[in-house]
Image (spheres, grey):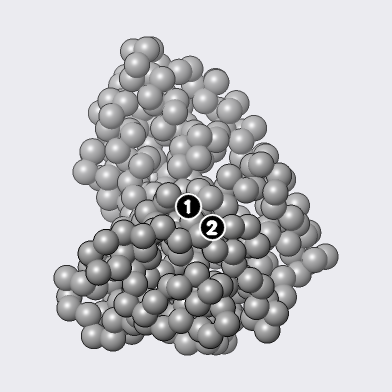
Amino acid sequence: MYFVIAILALGVLVIIHELGHFIMAKVNGVKVLEFAIGMGPKLFSIEGKETLYSIRMLPIGGYVKMYGEEEEVEGGDERAFSSKSPLQRISIIVAGPIMNLLLPVLIYTFIGINYGFLTPDINGVIPNSPAEASRIMKGDKIIAINDKKVDTWEDLSMDIFMAKDSTIKLKVLRNSAVEEIKLTPELNKEENRYMIGIEPTKIENPTFLEGINYGFRETKSIIKQTFTALKTLVSGKATVNDVGGPVSIIKISGAAAKAGLYSLLNLAAYISIQLAIFNLLPFPALDGGWIVLLLIELISRKKVSDRVVSTLNYIGFSVLLLLMLLVTIKDILFPIKL
């Protein structure tokens, strides 16, 4: 049952993404042939006025199929995607990732208002910890770590995790004055993570405006963490245990559903941000690849040939399928431990 809930939650993220494409296609007067959730063979469908709404067998991804998307339409039909200006087409393509970035703002706003949230204002210092040795005090507010601004408690936690046992530099606001403190995180063997020994402040009953502010700050924080993780992956510092595919996502989502609404919402917001950023990568077959081609067309004022677009998308889609196959095999042979 928890896995079913998890799959439904992931399906919502896909629907939100494709809904962005769908809405902007309609706004720009483009005919939508199909709005599909999932991939592979069709399980269920409803024929609308001009759009087929379908659910497909594999609960991974989805798509909006637009008239004139894959090839030029003869006669320049104004309802064809290919007949629209580069800026109009970019607005349609980028709408999906934008929706996936707006959703976490709403989710984190809901979480903040209903569950409260943590801030980098220090509410306590653990005895015999690096923080105590460095004379960090209750009431201090950490505003930067290694010269990077700290907006949320999660910002601080991630940077401490990334630093591990290396010396870090904190900027602490104390009595309206900024002080610099250097210390080295220590490994907490019980929790298997690096810590400096401080306790955050929890805002129990935030106002609506505080909740919205938290929603934006938390989304911004996860975006920064995602780019940090991508940098680690590209630099070769990540291990096989740091990479997961569809099996891992469903497994983690099922565990989150079992843990309760709070955990499931947090994970949904996190995955939604990953989906947005992944789709914006400048890679063929992804939204980012489309945007690059349209920007080239906008700057050069020359349309990229349909043959080039089709070839790039075919190669990109093949590579993505291969990567998905590899990470799925990894998930099976080296499953994550929860």
Of the residues under marks 1 and 2, which one precedes in the sequence?
1
Q: Is residue 120 left or right of residue 38?
A: left
Residue identifier under label 1: 146
Q: Is residue 126 left or right of residue 214?
A: right
> What secondary structure is found at the residue carrying circle 1?
loop
Query: Badge 2: how crowded within 10 Å, few (<14), some, or many (20+)?
Result: some
Q: Residue at x 68, y 59 (%)?
A: 242
From this view, report whether residue 272 is shown above or below residue 89. below
Q: CA distance from mark 1 to mark 2?
A: 6 Å
Q: Give the image quarter of residue 317.
A: top right
Residue lying furthest right: 333
The image position of residue 9, as x and y in percent, is 46, 72
Residue identifier under label 2: 168
Q: Which amino acid, mark 2?
A: Ile
The image position of residue 164, as x and y in percent, is 63, 62
In this orientation, does residue 5 appear? Answer: no
- Assess whether mark 2 and mark 1 are in contact (beta carbons under 8 angstroms): yes
- Split into 4 quadrants, where in the image is the N terminus? bottom right
Q: Residue at x 44, y 25 (%)?
A: 293
Q: Is residue 154 left or right of residue 27?
A: right
Q: Give the image quarter of residue 102.
A: bottom left
The image position of residue 225, as x and y in percent, is 49, 56
Nearest the camera: 27 or 293?
293
Q: Which amino acid, mark 1?
A: Asn
